[in-house]
Image: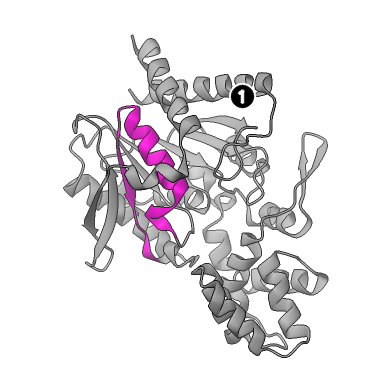
């Protein structure tokens, strides 16, 4: 019975993902409620309630994105999982909305889980948790916190996250991926340099105005494109202006590569704290891992490394997905094969959690 039920739900879920259209977002039904934040502040949690509120619950923890719970990818997942029969919670984590990479994010994840379990979720021993992108690694780290042990989530699903700061940066710098004797070349997404320099440029000495650069990057993160252009126009043509333009374009130069290495060295304690490579052996939860083979933000090899080092994990590398969306430039037979892989993976995930 579980076997059949898992495939019915998996087909509903994958079909909902495949037919999701961003132009339909304004018509989606959800509830914007709040939970008590780390310092007692009201913090939004967007909830997609299923028809039966006693159904299983899934908490989707965000990556670093200024769109937070309004991100189309988050809404796509929330709506699709609700259609498959789950209550879905999309909590905001304030620092991640500001794209701040810091230890406090781990504290927020554990605290948020505890708050939702105590005050929002009915079936407290029947909870699944999902971490997206940067949030996947943060969620794995947060599960080591006592606040996430009682009750312990039934499983963790990680999507598009990283394993090691070292291997992730190798890709960030070169765009090359080494996997099973093969080399893959993918142009890194421009968002990577923007987030890196925004968070850490103030920690190193450079012959430019660190604070000015950080402010321009903040405007870009907030999608204030006019402000970015105004500030860029105010700059004299020269090395500083070119550096900022290269960061915005994701064009990594030799000078920027040296800066990145300095930033890593200067912030190594924090980066290793956030890097699963350093503590993954302590994770004893069941972990399901998904990654898009053509992900230009985080290479799929990072999830392969996660899988290799976890005690109990199931891995899917999908050639349909990129960092968030389904690729549409493939042939029909290829798509059918990949959709079947996606359905099988999700059926295993659903069946494990029943």
Residue 239 horizontal side relative to residue 150, left or right: right
Q: Secondary structure at mark 1?
A: helix
Is residue 273 part of the magenta span, yes or no?
no
Residue 154 visible at all = no
Residue 275 horizontal side relative to residue 132, left or right: right
Quarter of the figure with residue 262? bottom right
Residue indicated by mark 1: 338
Residue 7 visible at all = yes
Q: From the viewer's side, name the closer residue of 66 and 280.
A: 66
Q: Residue at x 62, y 72 (%)?
A: 197
Residue 136 horizontal side relative to residue 301, left or right: left
Quadrant location of the C terminus in the rendered image: top left
Q: Position of residue 162 (x, y in %)?
A: 59, 49
Query: Is 116 located above or below residue 4 in the figure?
Result: below
Q: From the viewer's side, name the closer residue of 165 and 187.
A: 187
Is residue 77 part of the magenta span, yes or no?
yes
Neighbours of disc 1 within 10 Å: few (<14), some (14-19), many (20+): some
Range of magenta residues: 67-94
Quadrant location of the N terminus in the rendered image: top left
Q: Position of residue 19 (x, y in %)?
A: 47, 31
Q: From the viewer's side, name the closer residue of 116 and 15.
A: 15
Quarter of the figure with residue 191? bottom right
């Amino acid at each position: 019975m579980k076997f059949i039920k898992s495939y019915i739900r998996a087909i509903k879920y994958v079909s909902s993902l495949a037919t999701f259209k961003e132009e339909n977002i304004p018509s989606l039904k959800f509830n914007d409620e709040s939970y008590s934040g780390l310092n007692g502040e009201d913090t939004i949690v967007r909830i997609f309630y299923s028809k039966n509120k006693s159904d299983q619950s899934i908490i989707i923890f965000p990556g670093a994105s200024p769109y937070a719970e309004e991100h189309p990818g988050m809404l796509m997942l929330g709506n699709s999982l609700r259609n498959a029969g789950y209550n879905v919670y999309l909590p905001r984590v304030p620092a991640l909305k500001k794209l701040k990479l810091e230890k406090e994010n781990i504290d927020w994840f554990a605290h948020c889980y505890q708050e939702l379990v105590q005050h929002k979720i009915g079936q407290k021993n029947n909870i699944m948790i999902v971490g997206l992108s940067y949030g996947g690694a943060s969620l794995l780290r947060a599960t080591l916190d006592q606040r996430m042990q009682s009750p312990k989530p039934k499983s963790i699903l990680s999507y598009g996250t990283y394993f090691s700061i070292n291997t992730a940066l190798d890709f960030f710098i070169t765009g090359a991926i080494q996997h099973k004797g093969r080399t893959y070349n993918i142009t890194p997404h421009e968002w990577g340099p923007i987030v890196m320099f925004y968070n850490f440029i103030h920690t190193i000495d450079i012959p430019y105005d660190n604070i000015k650069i950080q402010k321009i990057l903040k405007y870009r993160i907030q999608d204030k494109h006019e402000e970015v252009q105004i500030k860029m126009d105010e700059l004299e043509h020269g090395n500083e202006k070119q550096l900022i333009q290269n960061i915005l374009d994701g064009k990594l130069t030799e000078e920027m590569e040296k800066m990145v290495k300095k930033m890593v060295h200067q912030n190594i304690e924090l980066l290793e704290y956030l890097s699963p490579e350093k503590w993954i052996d302590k994770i004893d939860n069941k972990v399901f891992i998904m990654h898009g083979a053509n992900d230009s933000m985080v290479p799929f090899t990072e999830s392969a490394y996660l899988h290799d080092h976890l005690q109990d994990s199931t891995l899917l590398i999908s050639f349909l997905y990129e960092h968030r969306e389904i690729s549409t430039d493939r042939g029909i037979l290829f798509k059918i094969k990949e959709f079947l892989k996606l359905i099988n993976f999700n059926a295993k995930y659903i069946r494990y959690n029943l």
